[in-house]
Image: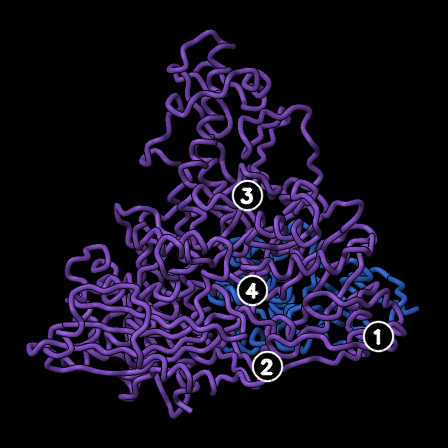
Chain colours: A blue, B purple
Amino acid sequence: MITLNVNGQSRQIDADPEMPLLWALRDLLKLTGTKYGCGVAACGACTVHVDGQPVRSCVTPVSSVANAKIATIESLGVKGDHPVQRAWIELDVVQCGYCQSGQIMSAVALVESNANPTDADIDAAMDGNICRCGTYPRIRAAIKRAAEIKRNGGAA
Amino acid sequence: MSTNRRAFLIGIGVVAAGTTVGVVVAPRLLGHRKPPFDFKPNAFVRIGTDGSFTMTLGKAEMGQGIYTGMPMTLAEELDVNPQRLTIEFAPVDPAFNHPFLKMQFTGGSMSTISTYDQMRLMGATARTMLVSAAAARWKVPVESLATDDGTVVERNGGRRATYASLAEDAAKLPVPAKENVKLKDRGSFKYVGKPQKRLDNVVKVTGRAVFGSDVQPPEMLKAVIARAPSFGAKVKSFDATRARAVKGVVDVKQVPSGVAVIAENTWAALKGREALQVEWDESAGQNVSTASLRAEWRGLAAKPGTVGKDVGNVKNALANAARKIDVEYELPYLAHACMEPMNAAALVKDGRCTLWVGTQNQSQDLNLVAQALGIPPANVELHTQFLGGGFGRRASTHSDFTVEAAHVANGVGRPVHVVWTREDDMRGGFYRPYSISRVRAGLTADGKPLFYHQTVVGKPVLKQSPIGKPIIDKLGFDPSSFEGAANTLYGFQNLRVESHDTDEVVTNLWWRSVGNSIHGFVVNGVVDELATLAGQDGYAFRRELLATQPRALAVLDAAAKNAGWGQPLPAGRHHGIALHESFGSIVAEVAEVSVEGRNVRVHRVTCAIDCGFAINPDQVVAQVQSAVIYGLSAALAGEITIDKGRAVQGNFTDYPVLRMSEVPQIDVHIVESDGPLGGLGEPGTPPIAPAVCAAIHAATGQRIRRLPIAASLA
């Protein structure tokens, strides 16, 4: 058995140590907000936080994160009231939505570490996240808006 | 059948949705319980005595925003704020059929076009009955009553009653005939025509939206399939001993598409597939490669083919042309590369089948599954889920991924979810057709456009689809070969389009905008070459070709003006322009591009669209931006090459798509007109490749006649 700390809860799973965290989250813990897109860390759909850093869960063996704090999209709550989610809603970012959990987890990590991200910062932080619907222009605008909401202490 | 209508029929491209297990619940109504009583005047809307409004959506949501657009239209006439609606995905039922395709289906950019009048009537019918119920209760004439966001009010400012309080009374009234239902004037619309927030925002930013990938019926197994490594390959034999020894593997079985490994979870299924030994007969595809097809098709393109359109006399025009070109255009196979790879879940038990799938093709999927299992369609139920992208791939002509899941699940007794890896998906075929065209075109002595003669070679899509046969039988040819060329808006007085239909083993399918993304490139490319030959710029030359098309001219002008066409640009930057009509909408795009060596950078794209009337203007902008980025990814580097029957590219590592740092600024200008409603999911895609290539020509003098651009500049 492997013990994982996911979204603040301790969870025991019976898994092959090599099983990627992605499949442990989705298949064993039924946390399906995190998505499979490529399996080779090329698209970012599976992005979660490990000790606050964005990582691609599709290439992260579950045994390597047994002692870490894992946070998935579900950790942001069900209402969409995190500043990044609020900005996403305000600007109607989503289309099909499949990549957005990963986009949002990458964006959350960016605005947590950078109060005022520039276009170059956004390019650097978000280039690993593919969106085939092409929501990029709105993601860029929403990250700036989310940073603004955060700077205002969460007030719009 | 008109050319336009034909274009609608053969396009497929945008999106779809599902219910019950893995039910999608609007976030604001989590915890919402079934009301004590529902007033249900038709299949689309229910008004609960608890104040709830529920809309049943027969279309699939794949990003295109129909989950918001159709509810807006219904809510407008019902007179309820659309944000108060809970949306549920419809079961497969004739009530949700496309009005003339007679099937439940989402694609061809026609969901709004084909349901707009219907949704208005459904909403207005309900409102009429609620007002009648209030009139009877208060013993006043209906003319003395009005409605306001879910409430019937007396015009004199007197009594008010919520729809919820009237629901039971309204349900006792007869449903009025269409003639007795008054629709609103467009001028009095409160919601339609104004930006409306997407109704799927909250579920999609919290990870709670249930895609096909996310369904969790109890006891479900996961499966992957060892798929044919090359097109047409057949299983000779397989040895499952090692696969079965993998912990978690439950079963290994042959199915029509390969050998399925069924396991307790996805990882175990993948490990099991790795351990599986399969011997394939690959003879069918051995001699098929992009290079061999190219050589063969170039020869075909030089020969007369089946005539799809013949206006004027191209033979005389060729003889009389003062200046002419004779050129070849080539476009590659393209994968759709939806973010969510294909997948479907099925439970086959006791002569019945339950399906959970994100599909654009609900009724066909259901019928083909029934056929595959040898059970009546009435014994199959299909729960549509959110689609992680569609782009036509989830409108499979053969319902391939859904039928496959039924085959795998058959005999298992538990639900089985067949998932495709990215490589399965990208190498699995159903590509945009490979296409080679020879085009001869020319000018009069005074530089006016004289003729256009195109011969296209490729495997058309429509004839592969069950919906295609009646259309092809009627016309005598497959119109999908010519889509976007035969019906070009450019006014060539002499125009002839011919085709050679091929039948290579590589499978193909509709890809966002279908033939339009192919021929929008060819036609605009040739028009640009003629402009250069005439000594004109691409904008002025197009104005001449569109002189009798006021809507197209307005769109072209809007794009040029907003882009600053003809004004000085920053050093090293160049403009290119293109225009194309598809799915009832006209789109013009101006690309601002710089080229350094083999690096092409698109800085800005200025778009103008006439879609008749914009239901949700902000989503019109979103769809055009989306279509531009999708088309730009393909134009710059998108290519599936075939080598000995195998698809070479397998993942985003060798099939690059646009990323954040490469995305241009994209401005979208809506040109309102009194034209009929046009589609939105696809029409933004065709103009981008030719606009960028025209700009590359302006920058370098090089004509790009073969896509992707990366292959031509290499």
**Label 4 packing within 10 angstroms: few (<14), some (14-19), many (20+):** many
Work out whether residue B377 or residue B386 is closer to the camera in this orientation and state it.
B377
Q: Is residue B605 visible?
A: no
Identified at 73% across, 48% down, the residue is: B353
On the image, the x and y values in percent for residue A34 come to 70, 63
Of circles 3 and 2, the one toward us is 2
Check disc 2 and report the residue beneath it.
B646
- Chain designation of label 1: B
Distance between the Cα atoms at labels 4 and 1?
54 Å
Say left or right for B225 vs B661.
right
Residue at the extreme right: A1
Whether labels 3 and 1 belong to a single chain: the reply is yes
Q: Residues at badges 3 and 1 in contact (C-beta under 8 Å)?
A: no
Of circles 4 and 1, the one toward us is 1
Q: Which mark is residue B617?
A: none
**Label 1 packing within 10 angstroms: few (<14), some (14-19), many (20+):** some
